[in-house]
Amino acid sequence: MTDRSGTFDPKLIAKYQRRFPDFDTKIISMYARGMTVREIRGHQEDLYGIDGFEFDAQRSLDPGQIRELATCRWIAHGDMKLFLGPPGTGKAHLAVALGREAIRQNYSVQFVIAATLAAMLAKAHDDGSLDKQLTQFARPKLLIIDELGYLPFEGNAAHLFFQLVSRRYEKGLDPDHPEQLSVGE
């Protein structure tokens, strides 16, 4: 199925792999109603952008702080952010919204689920391509890892994950800012 310009080609994924329930169904039904790709993207922005987040439902979040994160200055500085909280509190929504904002500002972004990441790193380790896999995950300026901490890493996965974090950290060091090397914090 494609749209008039041949650019819309939906790829359905298994329900258990979906990050947002009924997302594929919503996209396909919008297309079936005759919406253009541009209109669908606009609708996605309403649903999954910063402005679509229900701050009233998460009173512990400071909307100003989230809007500051949406400027992406922290990405430019090579900082890492971690959203902590119980399931259903909007961590994935905010991560996707910040990712979309980073893309809008021409940063490269990759999204991966922690269990998938661990499996990919373990497979790469086993088949001798770990360095290549670590390089691929170190390449995007923003790497969003969802569901980190929901399942414990098994076996060597924690060590492999640490290698990835170290690789990304080392890649992001700026020699003009030696304070990034501080160990005492």
Image: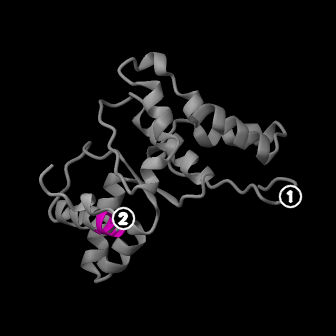
Q: Amino acid at mark 2?
A: Gly
User: Badge 1 is on which residue?
Assistant: 5
| Figure quadrant of residue 183 | bottom left
Name the residue located 47 percent from the left edge and 48 percent from the top edge. 73
Instruction: Report the front residue among 137 and 173.
Output: 173
Residues in magenta? 167-175
Amino acid at dot 1: Ser
Residue visible at 36% across and 64% down?
Answer: 172
- Vertical relation: 180 (above or below) 97: below
Q: Is residue 141 above or below residue 131?
A: above
**Between disc 2 and disc 1, whose residue precedes?**
1
Label 1, secondary structure: give it: loop
- Is disc 2 placed on a helix, strand or loop? helix
Residue 60 location (% of width, % of height): 35, 21
How many numbered marks are there?
Answer: 2
Q: Nearer the viewer, mark 2 or mark 1?
A: 2
Q: Nearer the viewer, residue 168 or 157?
A: 168
Identify the residue position indicated by label 2 in the image: 172
The one nearer the camera, 184 or 95, is: 184
* Label 2 neighbour load within 10 Å: few <14, some 14-19, many 20+: some
Is 30 a magenta residue?
no
Q: Nearer the viewer, residue 120 or 173?
A: 173
Report the coloring of the rendering.
one colour
Residue at x 78%, y 40% (from the top left corner): 39
Q: Specify the farthest residue to the right.
A: 4
